[in-house]
Image: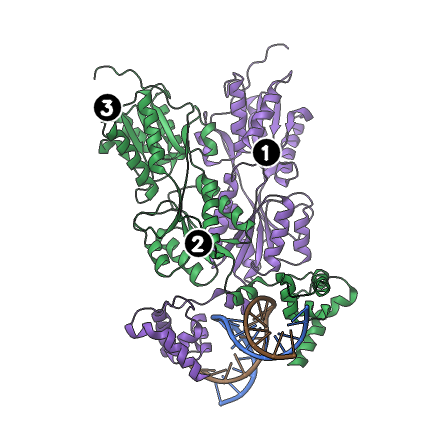
Chain colours: A green, B purple, C blue, D brown
Amino acid sequence: MSTSGRASARRRGQASATGSRAFASEGRVTIRDVARLAQVSPSTVSRAMAGNPRISEATRARVLEAMERLGYRPNAIARSLVTRTSRTLGIVLYRPADEAFAHPFFAEALRGVASVAQANGYSLLVTTAETYEMEAQQCLAMLEERRADGAVLLASRSSDPLVASLLQRQHPFVVLGRVPDRRSVYWVNNDNFQAAAMVVLHLLQLGHRELAVVGGRPELVVTQDRLEGVTSTLQEAGLGLAPERIALGDFTWEHGYRETSRLLAQGRPPTAIVAMDDVLAAGVIRAARERGLEIPRDLSVVGFNDDPMAQLLTPPLTTVRIPARELGEAAARQLIDRLDGRIPPVRHVVLPVELVVRGTTGPPPARGVS
Amino acid sequence: MSTSGRASARRRGQASATGSRAFASEGRVTIRDVARLAQVSPSTVSRAMAGNPRISEATRARVLEAMERLGYRPNAIARSLVTRTSRTLGIVLYRPADEAFAHPFFAEALRGVASVAQANGYSLLVTTAETYEMEAQQCLAMLEERRADGAVLLASRSSDPLVASLLQRQHPFVVLGRVPDRRSVYWVNNDNFQAAAMVVLHLLQLGHRELAVVGGRPELVVTQDRLEGVTSTLQEAGLGLAPERIALGDFTWEHGYRETSRLLAQGRPPTAIVAMDDVLAAGVIRAARERGLEIPRDLSVVGFNDDPMAQLLTPPLTTVRIPARELGEAAARQLIDRLDGRIPPVRHVVLPVELVVRGTTGPPPARGVS
DNA sequence: CTGTTAGCGCATTCAG
DNA sequence: CTGAATGCGCTAACAG
């Protein structure tokens, strides 16, 4: 055994004679090469890297220099195998076939996650999935195959089977969005009920009484919360929201466009439309304009998210700013805290939102006798 | 040894008595557990999983069933260590501090990469970096620490030191964008020179003679190619482009806004502005409108990319469709081909673009004597 | 303070 | 067709 060890050492170590770095075309430099050059044992090298205090400054310096000279990088895979952690966060991007592009909200949230992860020495393992079933399956696979130590879920739906599996198998995870009926789940969210209430209040204050809602996927908690915020607030004002004034579907501008055309064709069209997303709102505005309506004179429109595009629409969109990036950051922080053995101060984080009043809301048109 | 084996089997295997899966709170089920249950050796289990042909159907079935019953998942880390491949693609998202949000182009490209990766059994390791130096450093780290088998670079700049390092260290990688002066580098791109030429031709045809360009980061090859496409085409038409009509900077709408204000304040303002990106174009439009100009009557504007927002602007933006997603897919395909030992048919892939004429371009205003 | 010994969980020789 | 032995590169007891 020692013989073969020597032999391979000779094979690999040639570069050290020239003083240049050892970039063998195959076979990278390992901890043993460093140990040999520094005249210590591999464990000492390991300790030197880990900053282990029970090691002399002289040795540490020698090891560090050897590492430097050889251009050594510890093999993360080998390290993971023994430490049993990958220092990696799993995240799956769910992309239903009907959503043509990466939604800005998720892109921002992802950046938030990524930056906090990076700051704490974690990497991000990202997958995409076409269907929800695949999302769930892939997320589980990442975790059970030990490629990720924990997961952040980018949305939550009511009675989510993935959440159940994760919980049962005791995998650390954090949800971006509220998870109802499961107090033990860590999540990070904005108060969507409250956000929707703000929007409705704003419209009521302007004098609107005839509202309609255009929303996203009905199975998502975010959709449900926003819808409830709208209906509850209307109810408190003694107003209702007829079912034909509620148009859920998906988060595409096409859906906003389509449903608005329908809503405006009704005998008694709404004077204001709450779109549960800026992208939807863009579709709403477009449909309204094509029917010859001027915004906000003939129709008020509100969105959600404050995507970068919101202020670039004409007129600039009144919307609710959702701190996507901060949500992602908070989620990553929660998860990493747990993975690193710290207990997060709270299980549920709620970030504040802000109504951004711009150019798409105004008083309702004076209505003639119908 | 067999004794201790039995003991641990008993400790862990209790669930098998009940017929339910074995999810010990600590210590997952390994290949040895499966082997024991199937009454074979670990190597046989390994072969059964790998679809090794020299194994009887009966044994394979027995192994598969044991895997099923135990809910076994092979540990990807352990596998990586021995196979010396992680089946992971590295990708680093570069986010300069001044770019406020994830650019839609990159989001789409990323999705393309992710979906092809996923289809081929690869995962994606994603990092973010604030500076270019960090991007380079992190990319190298991923590769040398063996966490990724190859990398896809999301942009290329002229004389890119990262490209040089990657090449020297023989790491497989593919660049999204053209890499000048290095024929050996694999890259995937659209013809930006040609795209810009199309735009200029369109404007010339409409009668414009006074163009200006608002562009992104000057160190990026994409910026350089588009700029050259503009100037060359103008030159062929016997026209020039004065330096004060060229405003490079970054890919934010604020930059488009700012530079347009400046351009329009000049003694002899342009009648058409070529923005090298839809986001820039949005800023251009906004600035123009604030100065009381109507588009396209007083000023024509063209963008690049055909982001989803392009058609939602008012008026809908004339732009060049860049197949971001397809570029990402092609890049992933190139890289994976190489990693899997197939030789990609070509080293450089060029995807076609398409001019999408919408509402922001028209004939120039009749100019009075100055 | 440091070296030796043992694995982490798997794939892969090499023998049957 | 299958099992036993070996090692991927590293960390973590356990001994000095």
Q: Looking at this rendering, what residue extends furthest in the left direction? A: A370
- Where residue B144 sits, quadrant-wise, is bottom right
Mark 2: few/some/many CA within 10 Å (<14, 14-19, 20+): many
Residue B286 can be seen, yes or no: yes
Above or below, comparing residue A127 to residue A234 in the picture: below
The amino acid sitting under disc 3 is: Arg
Contact (Cβ within 8 Å) of mark 2 with mark 1: no
Which residue is more in the foreground, B116 or A232?
A: A232
Q: Looking at this rendering, what residue extends furthest in the top direction? A: B369
Q: Which mark is residue A151?
A: 2
The amino acid sitting under disc 2 is: Ala
Judging by the rendered image, the residue that carries numbered circle 3 is A268
Q: Secondary structure at mark 2?
A: strand
Rendered residue at 52%/19% (across/down)? B290
Residue B279, position as x, y percentages in the image: 52, 32
Residue A135, position as x, y percentages in the image: 39, 53
Judging by the rendered image, the residue that carries numbered circle 1 is B196
Say which chain tag 3 marks.
A
Residue B201 can be seen, yes or no: no
Mark 3: few/some/many CA within 10 Å (<14, 14-19, 20+): few
Q: Looking at this rendering, what residue extends furthest in the right direction? A: A18
Q: Secondary structure at mark 1?
A: helix
Which one is closest to the eye, mark 3 or mark 1? 3
Which residue is more in the foreground, D11 or B270?
A: D11
Residue B250, position as x, y percentages in the image: 60, 34
The amino acid sitting under disc 1 is: Ala
Task: State how far apart marks 3 and 2 are (Cα).
Answer: 47 Å
